[in-house]
Image (spheres, rainbow, N blue to C red):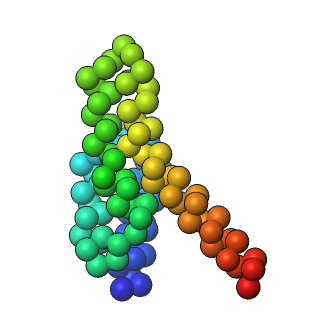
Amino acid sequence: MATIAAWRDTVLALLLLSPTGYSWYATWLVPFLVFTPEAAAMLLVAFVGAYYARFADRTGWGAAIAPWIGFAPAWVEIVVTGLRQRIANARS
């Protein structure tokens, strides 16, 4: 399972750090999530469809906010998880 989790984390990193974030790329995470579920990856798969809302509203706020709605929840979960681990390590 550690190997599957490592591959999942690699795909997640590639998706979050790539300059082009097409939402169908997130489907690459689904097979890994079956065996090793992780909150940030699940959030990315769940919210990345909001990326397409930017095409519905090209002149208003939708064009600017839609990509953030798709990717921000995963980034927030990664930061929160990292902070929790750092606090737990400091206490022990």
Residue occupying the point 70% across, 71% down? 87
Q: Residue 69: percent from the left, percent from the top?
A: 41, 39
Foreground residue among 91 and 20: 91
Q: Residue 9: percent from the left, percent from the top?
A: 43, 68
Vertical arrangement, residue 48 with respect to residue 51, above or below: below
**Quadrant (top left, top right, bottom left, bottom right) of the C terminus:** bottom right
Q: How many marks?
A: 0
Vertical arrangement, residue 43 with respect to residue 2, above or below: above
Foreground residue among 78 and 2: 78
**Quadrant (top left, top right, bottom left, bottom right) of the N terminus:** bottom left
On screen, residue 2 versus residue 28, left or right, reads: right
**Where is residue 19, by image quadrant?**
top left
**Where is residue 53, by image quadrant?**
top left
Residue occupying the point 40% across, 77% down? 5
On screen, residue 55 versus residue 76, left or right, reads: left
Q: Residue furthest top?
A: 59
Residue occupying the point 45% across, 54% down? 74
Q: Residue 49: percent from the left, percent from the top?
A: 28, 43
Residue occupying the point 65% across, 64% down? 83
